[in-house]
Amino acid sequence: HIAGLTKLANTIHRYGAVAGLHLAVAGRQANPNLFFSDEECAMGPSAMGPSPLFNAACREMTEAEIWQAIENMAAAAVRVKKAGFDIVLPNAAHGYLLAQFLSPHTNRRTDAWGGSPEKRCKFFRETFKAVREAVGSDMLVWTKISVKEPVDDGSNLEEATRFLPEGVK
């Protein structure tokens, strides 16, 4: 898809704009009709019942799958850079996988990837570290982060500010 994305980035630049591309991993929000066989299902930080989007359950990711997701995000960021975009945005909002790990509603793990806000932030931080290393210092890496989920036990502004680097708050 790099050739098509290059055309898009070039068109954006031709009109004097900066080109950015979101990287979004669906996690538990994956459409089971598009991606999975009868034996497979979506995966997320924790096993959960039906997602609000597709009424399908998800299973908990293994440690190996978590690291693979981080590697995949970094590899995708490299493709975004090769296509000529100026900014890559791993999306940590709207219920995508990064947001799912940050949220106490969807991340009910009790290992190094869940529990306290700091542990729930590990996937977010490791992803950003991998993306930054993959694209180098000459590309902007931005994100969006959910600060108020529409569920009682979801992310909120007070907790979300803990995930921001020092100096941003």
Image: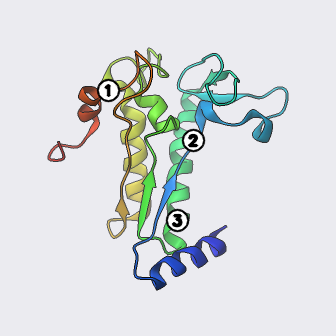
Residue 22, position as x, y percentages in the image: 49, 55
Which corner quadrant holds the N terminus? Answer: bottom right
Q: Secondary structure at mark 2?
A: helix
Colour style of the rendered protein structure: rainbow
Q: Nearer the viewer, mark 1 or mark 3?
A: 1
Q: Residue at x 57, y 43 (%)?
A: 25
Would you say 50 lies left or right of 80 here? right
Instruction: Say which amino acid is labelled 3.
Output: Val
Label 1: how many residues lie within 10 Å, few (<14), some (14-19) or many (20+)? some
Q: How many marks?
A: 3
Q: Which residue is mark 1?
A: 156
What label does residue 68 carry, if any? Answer: 2
Left or right for 158, reference 54: left
Task: Judge whether 64 appears above or below 71 on screen.
Answer: above
Quarter occupied by the C terminus: top left
Viewer-nearest of discs 3 and 2:
3
Q: Is disc 3 surrounded by few (<14), some (14 to 19) or many (20+) residues within 10 Å? A: many
> Reading the chain from its start, which is encountered first: label 1 or label 3?
3
Sequence-wise, the earlier of marks 3 and 2 is: 2
Where does the image place residue 70, in percent across and percent down from the top left?
Answer: 50, 44
Identify the residue under disc 3: 80
Residue in front for this viewpoint, 104 or 61: 104
